[in-house]
Amino acid sequence: MIEPLVLLAYIPAALALNLTPGADMMFCMGQGLRGGPRAAMAANAGIACGGMVHVLVAGLGLGALMAAHPGIFEAVRWLGVAYLLWLAVKSLRASGMPEVPRVSPGRAFREGLVVNLLNPKVILFVLAFIPQFVDPARPILPQFLLFGAVLSVGGLVVNGAVGLAAGGAAGRLMRSARFATVLGRVSAGIFGALALRLALMQRS
């Protein structure tokens, strides 16, 4: 399906992208702080699943529709901004409670999935990056899915490490009510910063 040399060239390029700090890494860190290591890994899995949905859409050619129609892009982008702001408000409200409720793995997975799906920049990135390695003489969709899987696995490892580190630190300190209050505010700040980043990003 894919030439071995092409795959060998793609893997380090994908890993370099995974190692670049970005929204996914920040989100996993925030979920780790809110819910511990299990929530961090669940959010990480949700992000990876969302990424594969973007890859599937791009491989089917639907991503080009979003790239060509700014209205669709903008609608998805502002839905993403609204969702991240909602998460920020929830975290801020929780910071005022005597005990900050921990995020369950199931909820962390859903939030990671939705945040990724509502980030239209991801599908534009997929459309810009993966086709550089695709052989048009071979079936397109299987190549997209394999390249996307490599990118997702790298993200699972890198973002998972960040989320686990944040979750481990939070777990040791959660018994402190003062820390729990600060934790809610930090999480709200992370989600608010991600919303601002998505709101200000350029489509190109």
Image (spheres, grey):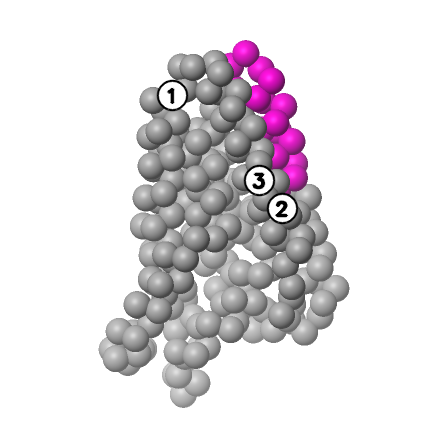
Secondary element type, mark 1: helix
At 43% from the left and 53% from the top, the residue drawn is 21
Q: Which residue is mark 2?
A: 195
Q: Are marks 1 and 3 in contact (CB under 8 Å)?
A: no
Magenta stretch, residue numbers: 84-100
Q: Which residue is mark 3?
A: 191
Q: Amino acid at mark 2?
A: Ala
Q: Residues within 10 Å of mark 1 (few under 14, many from 20)?
A: few
- Left or right: where does residue 49 sit relative to residue 74? left
User: The residue tagged with tag 2: helix, strand or loop?
Assistant: helix
Q: Is disc 3 placed on a helix, strand or loop?
A: helix
Residue marked by disc 1: 173
Q: How many marks?
A: 3
Q: Position of residue 36 (x, y in %)?
A: 39, 29
Residue at (51%, 73%) from the top-left corner? Answer: 128
Q: Is residue 97 above or below residue 48?
A: above
Separation of marks 2 and 1 at Cα, in angstroms: 27 Å
5 within the magenta span = no
Q: Mark 2 touching mark 3, by CB under 8 A?
A: yes
Residue 8, horizontal then vertical, whole percent: 26, 73
Q: Is residue 169 above or below residue 112?
A: above
Residue furthest toward the top?
98
